Amino acid sequence: MSRFTLSARGYATATVLFGALWLGGCATNTTPVLVESEDSNAQIGDQSKAPYLPSSLFVGSAGEFVGWRCTPSQDMVTAAQQDSLRLWSSQSAAELPQSVVASGTRYQQGNLSVWLKGDEGVVESERGRLECEAVTRRDSLRRSDKPGVMFYARGNEPGWSVELANDVPRIKMSLDYGERQVDVPYRVTTLDNGVGRVILASGRSDAPFELRIEAGACFDDMSGTPWPAKVTMNVNGQQLRGCGQGIAP
């Protein structure tokens, strides 16, 4: 059973769907320092269940993500399901049901509509019209790709990745291009289903870190591949930025 749930308010209707593109990958100074410890008494909450994450971090039944370059100067990520489209801008996420159209495929929710035909797309909202072109694609991750993982994120310079377990609140970190491997418990400090935001902190006082996950179009700053979540991690005196995805079975 996947550990995610639909928001009580669903995805945002997305009148603010189109803002500046967010790219992951840089490191800047901050203060927490992660120190591995053998002290089992410092561990907190190892036996509790993993939290339910916002549905806007997941791809649903879609098999791939598509990254779009839109004009004027906007970018978005989509994932097409059988009868709906999941759409991420740099600011938010939305799910639009499919509607009948003579040519191509159209999705609409309220004042927001998306028309797709091949590698071309048109997005219309009360804020205006965007002309879009598909520029990159990526297969969505499944539990078979990452067994036991409900959320995966990665970034560059220095290369890092994190995995959240699907059964208990534990996080595995690979830091400094894989030179350091850390497995520690975490606790949830913020969970907002409406906007798709989750903030996690360490469950060990001797190993501080903060992981911030937000639904929104994210593009790997080296490969350009599209992702549905922006991720920021403060650890070891650095602020690491990257992209992530919720993983369902």
Image (cartoon, grey):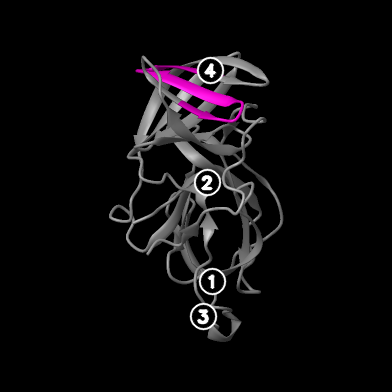
Residue that appears at 34% across and 37% down? 82
Callout 1 secondary element: strand
- Looking at the image, the residue that sits furthest to the right is 31
How far is disc 1 from disc 4 in space, using C-alphas?
Answer: 40 Å
> Which dot marks residue 70?
4
Check disc 4 and report its element: helix, strand or loop.
strand
Classify residue 109 as left or right of residue 127.
left
CA–CA distance between discs 4 and 3? 50 Å
Q: Amino acid at mark 4?
A: Cys
Q: Do we see residue 222 in this rendering?
A: no
> Is there any visible trace of residue 124 in the rendered image?
yes
Residue pointed to by mark 3: 38
Upstream in sequence: badge 4 or badge 2: 2
Residue position marked by numbered label 2 in the rendering: 56
- State which tag comes first along the sequence, 2 or 3: 3
Q: CA distance from mark 2 to mark 3?
A: 36 Å
Q: Residue at x 44, y 49 (%)?
A: 177
Q: Earlier in the sequence, mark 4 or mark 3?
A: 3
Marks 1 and 2, the one that precedes in the sequence? 2
Looking at the rendered image, the disc whose residue lies closer to the viewer, 4 or 2, is 2
Q: Mark 1, residues whose alpha carbon is within 10 Å: few (<14), some, or many (≥20)?
A: many
Q: Position of residue 219 (x, y in %)?
A: 50, 33
Name the residue at 49% across, 51% down: 176
Residue 101 percent coordinates (x, y): 40, 19
